C-alpha cells in the first residue's frame, strides 16, 4: 500500500484560520484601501517587533527587500558584498540589483551555512557588507557574524527569507545586522496568497529611505526625491499575514518537533549514508526545509533515491540543484566548477524531505521506513 506524503501541505494551517481570513479580506474589500492601507501599517509594526526590529517596510517581494534594503544601507556601485554560493538565486539578484558586486563564498558541509573562515579570505578593500542567509530556517551564528563584521568593518544585512522568527544565541533572525530581508512567498514559514516581502530594521533613516524607494521615490505625493520604483506589499496580503502572524510561533514549533522525529527515525540510516544536516541552534531552528545528505555510503545516489521515493508516493525537493556560481546567467562573474567544493558537493547530495506544520508523526515514520526499505 502506498501512502501519499506531499512535500508541502498548506491546507492544514489554512483550515484552522480560514473563516478569520475570509472575514478580514471582506473588511479590506469593503474599506476599499488596497495600497498602503491600515492593514499594511499594522502588520509592518507587528512583524518588525516580532523579529526584534522596530521598523518594517512591506515591499513587493523578498528579492526587492534585499535590493532596496541594501540600497538604503548605502551599498551599491563599487561595493563588494559577500554572499553564500549555495543560496536561492534571489540573494544574488538582490545584491546585483542594488548595483553592488556579489562575491561568492563556500559553505560548511554539515550545516550548509556560509563558512566565515572562507568569507574572511574573500574580503578585499572593496568589501562593504555580508549577506548571511539563514538557510533552511537555521540562523548563521549571530556572535560569529558580529565578530566577523567587526573585524573586517562590514555591514551585516540578513537574508531571513527562510527564517521568520528563527532564534540562536538569544538573537531573533532580523536583529543581528543593520537590516534584514523577508519573503512572504506562499510556501515560506509565513506566507501570503501571492508575492510579498519586508525589510526589518531598527534604523529610522534606513526605513524612511525604503518607504520612499518603494513608492516611486516620493517623499510626498508627486515630489520625487529619490530614484524609486513601485514595490509595495498589498494591503490584502498584509491583512492575511496579520491573521497568520499570531500562529507563526506554534507552526515553527511544529516544524521543529517534526524535525526531531525525523532525526530520531533516521539515526539507524546514518551508517547507510543518510545524514541530516546539523542543527546547531536547537529549538531556535525553524526548519523551513528538512534537508538530509545522501553521501557516498548510500547504495543509491540522491537522484536514484529521490525517484524511488517518488514512485512510492513521497514527494521530495532539492534546494538547490545548481549553485549560484554555475548558473548560466551569472557566467560574467567569472567563477568556474571547483571554486566552491562544499557547495558543489551539497548540490549532488542534498534531499529535502516533506516538511510543513501539521505533518504527522505517522507520515514522518512512513518517510523514514520507505527510505530504509529503498536503500
Ligand atoms: C524566497 C527567497 C528569497 C526571495 O524571496 P521572493 O519573495 O521569492 O522574491 C530570497 N532569499 C532566499 C534565501 C529565499 O529563500
Image (cartoon, rainbow, N blue to C red):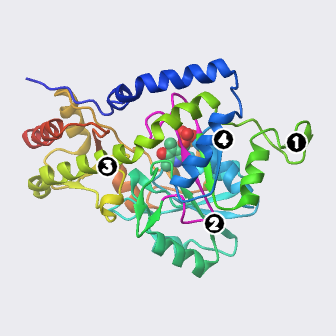
Structural distance between the alpha carbons of marks 4 and 2: 29 Å
Q: Residues within 10 Å of mark 4 (few under 14, many from 20)?
A: some
Q: 56 above or below 232? A: below
Horizontal side, residue 369 vs residue 145: left or right: left
Q: Quadrant of residue 280?
A: bottom left
Structural distance between the alpha carbons of marks 1 and 4: 17 Å
Badge 2 or badge 3: first in the primary sequence: 2
Structural distance between the alpha carbons of marks 2 and 3: 32 Å
Tell me the residue that label 2 is attached to: 129
Of helix, strand and loop, which one carries label 2?
strand
Q: Position of residue 265 (x, y in %)?
A: 12, 49
Tell me the residue that label 1 is attached to: 220
Badge 4 or badge 2: first in the primary sequence: 4
Chain part drawn in magenta? 173-196
- What quarter of the picture does the N terminus occupy? top left
Q: Position of residue 307 (x, y in %)?
A: 23, 33
Q: Nearer the viewer, residue 176 or 267?
A: 176
Q: Which mark is residue 253?
A: 3
Amino acid at each position: 500500500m502506498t501512502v501519499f506524503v506531499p512535500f508541502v501541505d498548506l491546507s492544514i494551517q489554512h483550515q484552522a484560520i480560514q473563516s478569520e481570513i475570509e472575514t478580514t479580506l471582506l473588511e479590506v474589500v469593503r474599506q476599499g484601501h488596497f495600497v498602503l492601507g491600515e492593514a499594511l501599517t499594522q502588520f509592518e509594526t507587528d512583524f518588525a517587533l516580532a523579529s526584534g526590529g522596530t521598523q518594517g517596510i512591506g515591499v513587493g517581494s523578498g528579492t526587492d527587500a534585499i535590493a532596496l534594503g541594501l540600497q538604503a544601507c548605502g551599498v551599491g556601485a563599487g561595493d563588494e558584498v559577500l554572499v553564500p554560493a549555495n543560496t536561492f538565486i534571489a540573494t544574488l539578484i538582490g545584491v546585483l540589483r542594488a548595483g553592488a558586486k556579489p562575491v561568492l563564498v563556500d559553505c560548511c558541509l554539515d550545516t550548509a551555512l556560509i563558512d566565515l573562515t572562507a568569507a574572511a579570505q574573500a574580503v578585499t578593500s572593496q568589501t562593504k557588507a555580508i549577506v548571511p542567509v539563514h538557510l533552511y530556517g537555521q540562523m548563521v551564528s549571530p556572535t560569529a557574524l558580529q565578530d566577523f563584521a567587526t573585524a573586517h568593518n562590514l555591514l551585516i544585512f540578513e537574508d531571513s527569507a527562510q527564517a521568520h522568527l528563527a532564534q540562536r544565541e538569544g538573537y531573533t533572525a532580523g536583529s543581528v545586522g543593520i537590516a534584514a530581508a523577508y519573503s512572504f512567498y506562499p510556501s515560506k514559514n509565513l506566507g501570503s496568497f501571492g508575492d510579498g516581502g519586508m525589510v526589518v530594521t531598527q534604523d529610522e533613516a534606513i526605513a524612511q529611505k525604503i518607504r520612499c524607494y518603494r513608492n516611486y521615490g516620493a517623499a510626498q505625493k508627486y515630489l520625487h526625491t529619490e530614484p524609486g520604483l513601485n514595490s509595495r506589499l498589498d494591503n490584502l496580503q498584509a491583512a492575511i499575514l496579520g491573521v497568520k502572524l499570531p500562529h507563526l510561533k506554534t507552526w515553527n514549533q511544529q516544524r521543529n518537533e517534526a524535525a526531531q522525529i525525523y532525526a530520531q527515525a533516521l539515526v539507524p540510516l546514518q551508517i547507510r549514508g543518510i545524514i541530516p544536516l546539523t542543527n546547531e541552534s536547537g529549538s531556535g531552528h525553524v526548519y523551513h526545509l528538512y534537508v538530509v545528505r545522501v553521501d557516498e555510503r548510500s547504495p543509491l545516489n540522491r537522484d536514484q533515491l529521490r525517484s524511488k521515493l517518488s514512485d512510492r508516493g513521497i514527494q521530495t525537493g532539492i534546494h538547490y540543484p545548481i549553485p549560484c556560481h554555475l548558473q548560466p546567467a551569472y557566467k560574467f562573474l567569472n567563477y568556474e566548477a571547483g571554486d566552491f567544493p562544499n557547495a558543489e558537493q551539497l548540490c549532488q547530495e542534498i534531499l529535502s524531505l516533506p516538511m510543513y506544520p501539521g505533518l504527522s508523526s505517522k507520515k514522518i515514520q512512513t518517510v523514514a521506513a520507505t527510505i530504509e526499505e529503498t536503500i
